[in-house]
Amino acid sequence: MLVVMPTYNERANLEPVVAGILAHPFTRVLIVDDGSPDGTGALADALAVRHSGRVKAMHRTGPRGLGRSYIDGLRHAITSGADTICQMDADLSHDPSALPELAAALQHYDLVIGSRYLNGAISVVNWPLHRIMLSAFANRYIRAVTGLSPRDCTSAYRAWRCSLLAQLPLQHARTSGYAFLPEMLVEAVRLGGRVGEVPILFVERRAGASKLSLHVLLESLLVPWLVVLRGGRVRRADRPRRG
């Protein structure tokens, strides 16, 4: 499994998260640094030398954004020969210990979401109440507008079969921020991808600053409607089962 991990000013978190990923012998890591001014890119290069063959660093130039980083990283991953590809955050909010469960679920699904909202539970740590309410509203809003059925449409912790990921129109994504996540989920379902969810515990970042901004929030409100206008709501027959 190739783990694609975008970074921007994550120097304090990068070493421990890479160590956690590499603790699983079936993993490799692609660090996609978005021109971090704090030296994250240089540390990524050092880790690539230290773990030659298992860690690679990609240095992006041009406009920044989570969606753009994922597009570049996932397109590279598709050509790498990996059968399965995982995407995850670099701030230790996504626990690398969940990787085996995500990988195992790909035996039954084409896309597996590490979900914070399964079985009526909210599995987050150190989030203030307003952040929980914002996330819950965002997921309800996205499901209502698009017709998606997964409980956590905005989770960035995802494992893919490369056969599905390679069909996604990554180059035509409308978004540069977090709205990239539900946009690509809609496209995966439209392609007939089998989507499952497994529970994870999401822990708020320990170091560094959140990348959430007003622009990101406004984009997240607008993009679901643009996705629907482009191809319509997800039809009931297309909706995936939840794991």
Image: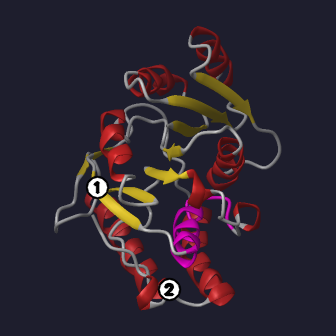
Residue 223 occupies which quadrant of the picture? Answer: bottom right
**Residue 59 locus on image (x, y percent):** 74, 32
Residue 137 occupies which quadrant of the picture? Answer: bottom left
Q: Is residue 37 visible?
A: no
Q: Secondary structure at mark 1?
A: strand
The three-letter code of the residue at mark 2 reads: Val
Q: Secondary structure at mark 2?
A: loop
**Residue furthest toward the top?**
50
- Rendered position, 188 above or below 156: below
Residue 144 occupies which quadrant of the picture? Answer: bottom left
Q: Residue at x 31, y 63 (%)?
A: 130
Q: Earlier in the sequence, mark 2 or mark 1?
A: 1
In magenta stretch: residue 74: no
Q: Which residues are magenta?
A: 175-191
Q: Give the side of residue 229 with respect to residue 213, left or right.
A: right
The three-letter code of the residue at mark 1 reads: Val
Q: Residue at x 69, y 38 (%)?
A: 34
Q: Residue at x 39, y 52 (%)?
A: 106
The residue nearer to you, when weighing 10 against 155, is: 155
In magenta stretch: residue 178: yes
> Label 1 belongs to which residue?
198
Disc number placed over residue 146 in the picture, else none: none
> Label 2 belongs to which residue?
234
- Rendered position, 232 above or below 240: below
Q: Give the side of residue 153 with respect to residue 180, left or right.
A: left
Q: Is residue 237 visible?
A: yes
